Image (cartoon, rainbow, N blue to C red):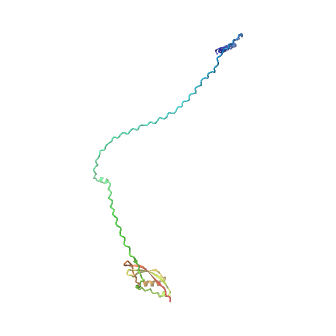
Amino acid sequence: MLVAAAHAAGLLAIGWIAQHKRVEPVERPIEVALIQAEALRPPTPPPPAPPPPMPEVRQPAPPAPPKVQARPQPRPQPVVKQASVAPAPASTSPSAIRAEAPTAPPAPAVAAPAPAPAAPPAPAPVTAARFDAEYLNNPAPPYPPLSRRLREEGKVMLKVLVSAAGLPERIELARSSGSERLDRAAEDAVRRWKFVAARQGEQSIESWVLVPIIFKLQES
């Protein structure tokens, strides 16, 4: 390999001289020596370039834990013993008496309920007054002559207040017959009647009674 390099260098030198100075060529025999060259080895590839360094990624630092401030321990309070104080005597001054709350008056005693009064006895039954007893002999009222001629007929209803003695004290016209003469004749006759007074138990009492009077002409 060195021989080849020297040979190449000689050739370069000869070429340069030929360019600058014309020299007559001299025929010289060229000896060629065969030099066994060493087996060419493939050039060793250069080592691969190292990869560019990766940019360093900085991870954020974890937040610092909050500082826990220690709470101050409560200091034990000194125990203060209170001296027993004797109660002051009650003041008898007027202002002290007015300041006191008035005591509630005692509740009145509840009287025992009075016994229920006894139920009154039931009243005795009342017997109504009567006017139709046979022993009374009450005459029928006379027929007024004018009413007979005029052929007036009718029924008169009288309301009579009978006293405890059995006498008519008051007479009222409850229903007219339609003829004033017949009504007046019936009222005049009943005013002279006697009645059996109403009774309540064994006692005679006054009461009202209805007395009907019928005026009717007889066929001749």
In the current view of this chain or complex, which residue is farthest to the bottom?
A: 220
**16 left or right, relative to 120:** right
Judging depth in this view, the residue of 77 and 28 nearest the camera is 28
Position of residue 34 measured from the top left corner of the image (x, y, whole percent):
67, 14
Q: Position of residue 87 (x, y in %)?
A: 29, 49
Residue 48 occupies quadrant: top right
Q: Quadrant of residue 80?
A: top left
* 89 or 18, nearer to the observer: 18
Q: Is residue 181 above or below residue 31?
A: below
Q: Is residue 61 above or below residue 157?
A: above
Closer to the camera in the image, 10 or 15 = 10
Tally of numbered discs: 0
Instruction: Give x and y (percent) for residue 206.
Output: 39, 79
Depicted 215 relative to depicted 31: above or below: below
Q: Position of residue 204 (x, y in %)?
A: 37, 79
The N terminus sits in image quarter: top right
148 to the left or right of 88: right
